[in-house]
Amino acid sequence: MTRTRVGFIGAGVIAERHLDDLLGFDDVAVVALADPRAERADELAQKCDARIYPDHEAMLAEEALDAVYVCVPPFAHGAPEDALIERGIPFFVEKPLAIDVAPAERIADAIDRAGLVTAVGYHWRYLDIVEQAQRLLADRPARLALGYWLDATPPPAWWSVEARSGGQFVEQTTHIFDLARLLVGDVESVQAIAGRTPRAAFPEADVPEASVAMLRFASGAVGSIASTCLLNWPHRIGLHLFCDGLAIELSEFDLMVDVGQGRPLQRAAGDPFVREDRDFIDAVQGKPNRIRVPYAEALRTHRLATAAARAARQGEAMAVNAS
């Protein structure tokens, strides 16, 4: 069997998540890892006997790769994608696509011209309970959407600095924006407010610790999505939808459907990360392309998330380009 040769740019937690999936595929070989933190790359390399490089340019100069996973912080996007597009190498990139929208727009144009296979890590779209919600909404579309990302402040120092992470809307809540787009439809405009006060535990932080985005969908539906990083645990992360005689509460782990006869709970089955990784590898191998979130589709969500962040900073409504 000829195995697909995969490299990784970035060797952090999310890279390890994908690498573990790929190690379960007998038609994939992870052969190279690029990360400036050699000790971190070495930990992953021990799992797969991959070669280690200090940066993506060194890796790409030495390795013949069929595909690459880009798992870098938001501020590090741009150069890795440019290098892969220049070499015609398909890639999977973790969200968010960038700190702001302009770099992602430029990369999307280059991908389109190159005709590359790409995928982006909006893994919620691969949940079986999300598929169930789509079926429920087919006949009774949502008219009100209430989204939440009420959680702790992640430990990486870059996360708390807006110029490096893009802020919570862009780096975390983008999953909820994506789910809202999938289940309710494209958003025409967004308004937002955000608050920030000094926090002794995070003296360098400048990201808002509380924010709310208000959405108007093209369908006429309306919604709000609230975020906070004030907690020490994930209190609520999900999307609640209200339709004619139907309420749906959806998280990454379960689905509750309320039609006035109790609150039955359906647990998610299967691993959405494995499903998205399998679809990407299959497309790279020339099999039918079932990728649910190619770069161009992820860009539509990124436009919404970055528009919400701009609306919060500027205090005015933002139109959202859904094309």
Image: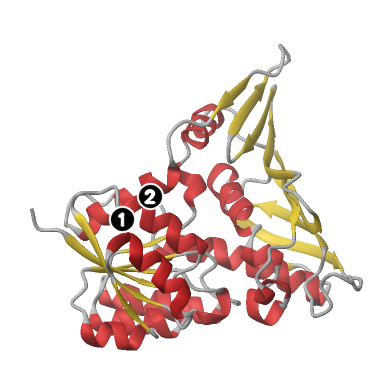
Say which mark, if any, is on residue 280. 1
In the image, residue 146 sits, relative to residue 119, either above or below, namely: above
Q: Distance from label 1 to label 2 (Cα)?
A: 6 Å
Q: Is residue 163 visible?
A: yes
**Looking at the image, do the residues carrying marks 1 and 2 touch, with CB atoms under 8 Å apart?**
yes
Q: Position of residue 267 (x, y in %)?
A: 55, 27
Say which mark, if any, is on residue 115. none
Residue at 32% of width from left, 73% of height from top? 112
Instruction: Pick the residue in front: 5 or 290.
Output: 5
Q: Report the side of 255 relative to 106 (left or right).
A: right
Residue at 51% of width from left, 34% of height from top? 134
In the image, residue 154 sits, relative to residue 246, either above or below, namely: below
Q: Is residue 323 visible?
A: no
Q: Which element carries disc 2, helix, strand or loop?
A: helix
Q: Report the side of 284 relative to 99 (left or right).
A: left
Residue at 60% of width from left, 76% of height from top? 99
Q: Quadrant of residue 317?
A: bottom right
Q: Position of residue 197 (x, y in %)?
A: 91, 71
Q: Which element carries disc 1, helix, strand or loop?
A: helix
Instruction: Pick the residue in front: 119 or 157.
Output: 157
Identify the amino acid type marked 2. Glu
Instruction: Pick the residue in front: 135 or 199.
Output: 199
